[in-house]
Amino acid sequence: MTLAAQLADVAAQTFPLACPPTTTTEDIASFVGANLSAERFAEYLADPDREVLTVADGERIIGYAMLVRAGAAAELSKIYVLPEHHGRGASAALMERALATAGEWGVRRVWLGVNQKNERAQRFYAKHGFEVEGTRTFRVGSRLEDDYVMARSVPAAGTSRAGTSCGIRRPASPR
């Protein structure tokens, strides 16, 4: 299975967990098909302004994060871990590595969108220094969802404790 296919598989299992319970399976399937397919992940992996980080248990990818570079800021577009690995440090390791990567890029801020009903994710982001700075709408299939925009500053490169431990791997770049 290709890296893109592995990422799509994890995404299909984890994206629904971030959606409010009122989101229909049809809307989730529409979003996953349009944005989280193996073909889309192949595009993301080839994009020089994106960095896809993975965390693995042995050879099996159990989570991923994706940063999108945009000038002096970066969007933490995705950070998902399979539910059976929640609470074991995989998400924290991905977050540390994502922030370190942003610092290596020279960006000063990282922002993300999180559904206003996803309190677990909001607590996780707050624990990692993110604060609510505004709101936005986010389309999932035919629905518009309400998100908080959370952001934080990024330490300069070389000042983070993050590394490649805890099973974090940067996929081999196709570039």
Image: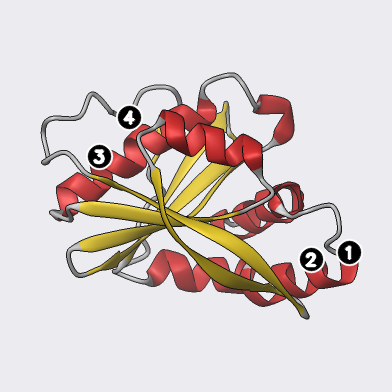
The x and y percentages for residue 12 are: 73, 56
Residue bearing mark 1: 25
Tell me which numbered mark, 4 or 2, is placed earlier along the sequence. Answer: 2
Residues at marks 2 and 1 touching, judged by CB atoms closer than 8 Å: yes
Residue type, numbered disc 3: Ala
Look at discs 4 and 3 and give the one toward the viewer.
3
Q: Residues within 10 Å of mark 3 (few under 14, many from 20)?
A: many
The x and y percentages for residue 109 are: 24, 53
Residue 100 circle label: 3
Residue at left 88%, top 65%?
24
Front-most of 30 and 23? 23
Instruction: Report how far apart the C-alphas of labels 4 and 2 lie in the structure.
Output: 32 Å
SS at mark 3 in the image: helix
Can residue 86 be seen by looking at this rendering?
Answer: yes
Residue type, numbered disc 4: Thr
Tell me which numbered mark, 4 or 3, is placed earlier along the sequence. Answer: 3
Residue bearing mark 2: 28
Residue type, numbered disc 2: Ile
